[in-house]
Amino acid sequence: GNSVTQMEGPVTLSEEAFLTINCTYTATGYPSLFWYVQYPGEGLQLLLKATKADDKGSNKGFEATYRKETTSFHLEKGSVQVSDSAVYFCARSVNTGNQFYFGTGTSLTVIP
Amino acid sequence: EAGVAQSPRYKIIEKRQSVAFWCNPISGHATLYWYQQILGQGPKLLIQFQNNGVVDDSQLPKDRFSAERLKGVDSTLKIQPAKLEDSAVYLCASSFRGVNTGELFFGEGSRLTVL
């Protein structure tokens, strides 16, 4: 089937700590992969994306690499800030019909 | 550029009542999506339109939910009659073309509470 599995939260880190949020996918074909972020009180917004295998998406210090061999798209950041506190959603699209599916979300809290 | 507009932002109703949500996508975006986001869960696709045609409504509870996009622009999502488990945020999103290389633009959502 077509699904996205995310690391369960919540995750609490100290400022400047290293962040990894795991995401794996199952899909037929060759999906594009995305990370969306939802800051408190705001709507979902795109954080980064990768459209083919071995692509690396990056934005605001966050990175994720499309790994076809492990069907993964893990989100990483070397040094988190308090302002990174949010819920992060892994998502994928499928070519046929342009369907778009989200994981369950991982809540991140960064403490000073 | 104006973003995706949704209304109302908040709605409280009693079970068995009806409710309607409205969405106006970004101008020129052919694809429109309605998602249901229950607290603590990821958004779940309810229905996807391409212009005024339905692409995917496989997860729409059709006995109580309906949606339309008559002129291929704005859209309405209706719930009748509402159940307690319909309490959620209803998100509208739009995209210019296919999502594989593009992205979805989300509205702020309509929060429904069913008592």
Image: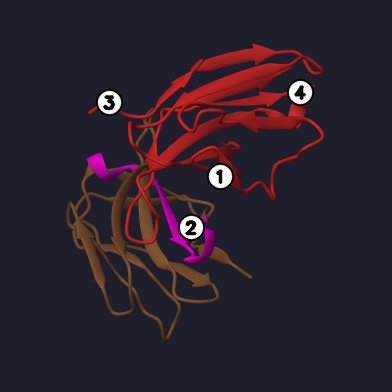
Q: CA distance from mark 1 to mark 3?
A: 21 Å
Disc 2 marks which residue? A98
Residue picked out by circle 3: B2
Q: CA distance from mark 4 to mark 1?
A: 21 Å
Q: Residue at x 49, y 53 (%)?
A: A9
* Disc nearer the start of the sequence (4/1): 1
Secondary structure category for the residue under label 1: strand
Instruction: Tell me what hue chain B is rendered in.
Output: red
User: Is residue B85 in the magenta section?
Assistant: no
| Image quadrant containing the C terminus of chain A | top left
Q: Are marks 4 and 2 on the same chain?
A: no
* Vertical comparison of A63 with A41: above or below: below
Q: Nearer the viewer, residue A19 or A95?
A: A95
Please state which amino acid type lies under the numbered disc 1: Gln
- Asked whether the residues under the numbered discs 4 and 3 touch, taking CB atoms below 8 Å apart as contact, a structural biologist would say no
The answer to which of A62 and B32 lies nearer the viewer is B32
Dot 3: chain letter: B
Q: Secondary structure at mark 4?
A: loop
Disc 1: which chain? B
What percent of the width, then of the height, locates residue B112?
A: 61, 22
The magenta segment: A83-99
Locate residue A37, reporting x and y percent: 35, 46
In the depicted view, which residue is nearer to us: B91 or A12?
A: B91
Whole-percent x, y for residue A64 in the image: 29, 67
Residues packed near mark 2 inside 10 Å, few (<14), some (14 to 19) or many (20 plus): some
Same chain assignment for discs 2 and 3 = no
Q: Are marks 2 and 1 in contact (CB under 8 Å)?
A: yes
Write down the residue under mark 4.
Answer: B82
The residue that label 1 is drawn on is B48
